[in-house]
Image: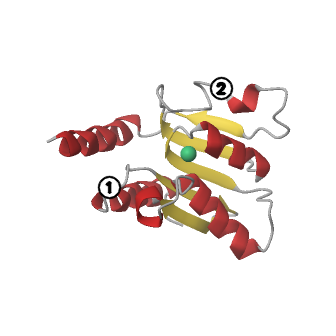
């Protein structure tokens, strides 16, 4: 299997090429890729079409299950509060993300969704992978949009 982060970053770059904020997500179980997606809120006219949500939907559809037990999620950016909620509902086992997001993240910033008593399933969280690459991708994207 390819490095899941390679797939996530490819999906993020694809999103950027479409004018979407460059974030990519991949769901993996037993070294099999069950879902890959980039951000698509603009293309789908759907504010909930974040990469994580789309990758989770694809994996759930593939498994015919609303829970992704024993599945791991790889994301290029710290998930927002909405996606953190979805990750919890999906019962994702481990969450790996690249850059943290002090402005919009909901895992180690903002509401810290997994640390709340109302959160009934928290994944194991690992962060800090390929941070410079992820941060660079976002910086480049927003610089181009301003330009
Ligand atoms: Zn999100």
The residue depicted at 52 percent of the width and 57 percent of the height is 4
The residue sitting at 50% across, 62% down in the picture is 37
Task: Give the structural element (helix, strand or loop) at label 1.
Answer: helix
Indicate the quadrant containing the C terminus: top left, top right, bottom left or bottom right.
top left
**Residue nearest the viewer, comparing 30 with 127:** 127
At x 35% / y 62%, what residue is drawn?
14
Decide: few, some or many residues near mark 1? Use Cα within 10 Å; few <14, some 14-19, many ≥20.
Answer: many
- Between marks 2 and 1, how big is the CA–CA gap? 27 Å
Residue 101's disc is none
Name the residue located 44 percent from the left edge and 50 percent from the top edge. 23
Q: Is residue 59 left or right of residue 98?
A: right
Residue closer to the observer: 141 or 91 = 141
Q: Could you say where residue 130 lies in the image, as x and y percent from the top left?
A: 41, 40
Position of 84 relative to 8 (above/below): above
Q: Secondary structure at mark 2?
A: loop
| Residue 105 horizontal/vertical position (percent) | 54, 32
Task: Residue 26 in the image: state x and y as whole percent.
Answer: 56, 58
Query: Extreme left residue here?
Result: 147
Q: Label 2, on which residue?
A: 111
* Among numbered discs 2 and 1, the one appearing first in the sequence: 1
Inspect this view and state whether residue 91 appears: no
**Considering the image in quadrants, where does the N terminus appear?**
bottom right
In terms of image quadrants, where is residue 13? bottom left
Instruction: Give the residue at mark 1.
Output: 16
Q: Relative to 131, is 44 above or below?
A: below
Instruction: Count numbered badges in the picture.
Output: 2
């Amino acid at each position: 299997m390819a490095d899941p982060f390679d797939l996530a970053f490819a999906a993020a770059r694809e999103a950027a090429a479409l004018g979407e904020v460059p974030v990519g997500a991949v769901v993996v179980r037993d070294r099999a890729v069950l879902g890959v997606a980039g951000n698509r809120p603009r293309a789908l006219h759907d504010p909930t079409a974040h990469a994580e949500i789309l990758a989770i939907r694809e994996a759930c559809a593939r498994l015919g299950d609303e829970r992704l037990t024993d599945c791991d999620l790889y994301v290029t950016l710290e998930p927002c509060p909405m996606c953190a909620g979805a990750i919890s509902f999906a019962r994702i086992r481990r969450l790996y993300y690249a850059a943290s997001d002090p402005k919009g993240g909901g895992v180690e910033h903002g509401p810290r969704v997994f640390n709340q008593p109302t959160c009934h399933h928290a994944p194991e969280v690992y962060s800090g992978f390929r941070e410079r690459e992820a941060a660079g991708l976002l910086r480049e994207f927003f610089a181009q949009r301003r330009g």
